[in-house]
Image (cartoon, rainbow, N blue to C red):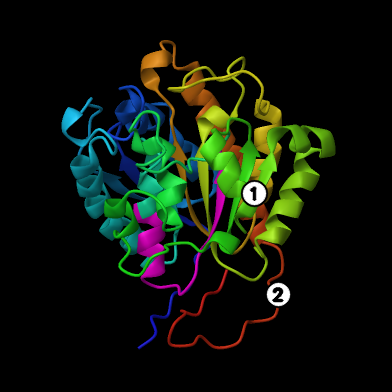
Amino acid sequence: MAVKIVRQPNKIAIIGAPSSAAAFLPGSEKAPAALRAAGIVERLQSIGYEVTDLGDCAPRLFADDEEHKRARNIPEIVASLNELKPHAEMGLKAGALVLVLGGDCTQIIALLTGARRYYKHVNLLWFDRDADLNTPASTPSGRLDGMVLASIIGKGSPELVRFWGEPPLVREPDGLIYGLHRVDPPEVEFLTRSPLRHVYAADIRLHGAEKSAHDALAHLHADTREFMVHLDLDVITQEEFPATNVPDSGGLSLAEVRSSFVEFVKQKNLLGLDVAQYNPDRDPDGSAARKVVDLLADALAARLEALAAPAPPAASPATEDSPSTTA
């Protein structure tokens, strides 16, 4: 039988995913606690959201893991996904927008898998300066943060590809990389022949963030299809946001990221999002955490305002494969 999910525009379910197991450095496992301390829950409540805090999963820590050199810490990463997935399912089934506070980038796999329990297809907007399309055969580091998107589209680590029983978790034509700036040669080669769309940071700067975001949403068919957003905070230039594992110059300004992110989050078909790669060890005064909270609050306030507008005509009844949703 179909599961009837009634979307609740004023509800958010927050889940902490304190993991650095897939990362290039320790520290991102502290991100959920730091963002809570910076007031994320209180800010969202002050905007007008009903916040359900589903708590934090168990910490999963960075380690060199010489036993799995081509997919480091893979047992810990799979364990973290198995713990996060039912929390994501719970939030989605309740009709809430699910916000995962990470952590490393692998946590989006559990969020997507939770959504696929109820939705036949879920599109993905990958907001990141890196393609994360390496595989165990091509990785220069063995760190799974550089292979997450490859696994999602069925090309990466077998353990992560198989996490969803019928790969791919997201089909290549249903994904889009936004803000691309660092790309390894094997990733460049892959993107030249893949239907996975990608938008470079330089083109976003050239055409403007708001227009580029609208174009990306059109390519994803976000007006008619459910989707997720993965936000890797190293997409922000290091001059404005150095508190990530692999900061870099170039890329997008904080203002450009904010303008784009607001447009993405405003969409009624957004099911959830995860925020990754904030490293409190590189934020001694907490200023970067406050920037993240401000960024989330700005986008989610715009969402609440947009969804309060008159609703469009009701969609056709749900089929067995897809639940009915109302925004």
Q: Position of residue 117 (x, y in %)?
A: 36, 70
The residue nearer to you, when weighing 31 against 162, is 162
Task: Say the numbered circle drawn on residue 40.
Answer: none
Q: Position of residue 227 (x, y in %)?
A: 54, 61
- Residue 122 among those drawn in magenta: yes
Residue reaching furthest to the left: 67
Residue sitting at 76 percent across and 53 percent down?
215
Q: Which residue is mark 2?
A: 312
Residue sitting at 41 percent across and 42 percent down?
147
As measured in the structure, the alpha-carbon distance from the residue carrying label 1 to the one carrying label 2 is: 38 Å
Q: Secondary structure at mark 2?
A: loop
- Residue 91 among those drawn in magenta: no
Q: Which residue is mark 1?
A: 192
Q: Position of residue 141 (x, y in %)?
A: 36, 28
Under mark 2, the amino acid is Pro
Q: Secondary structure at mark 1?
A: helix
Q: Is residue 300 visible?
A: no
Q: Nearer the viewer, mark 1 or mark 2?
A: 1
The residue nearer to you, when weighing 185 against 234, is 185
Under mark 1, the amino acid is Thr
Q: Position of residue 325 (x, y in %)?
A: 52, 75
What is the span of residues highlighted in magenta in the rendered image?
Answer: 110-128
At label 1, counting other C-alpha atoms closer than 10 Å, the crowd grade (few under 14, some 14-19, many 20 or more) is few
Is 143 situated left or right of 257 in this image?
Answer: left
Q: Is residue 18 visible?
A: yes
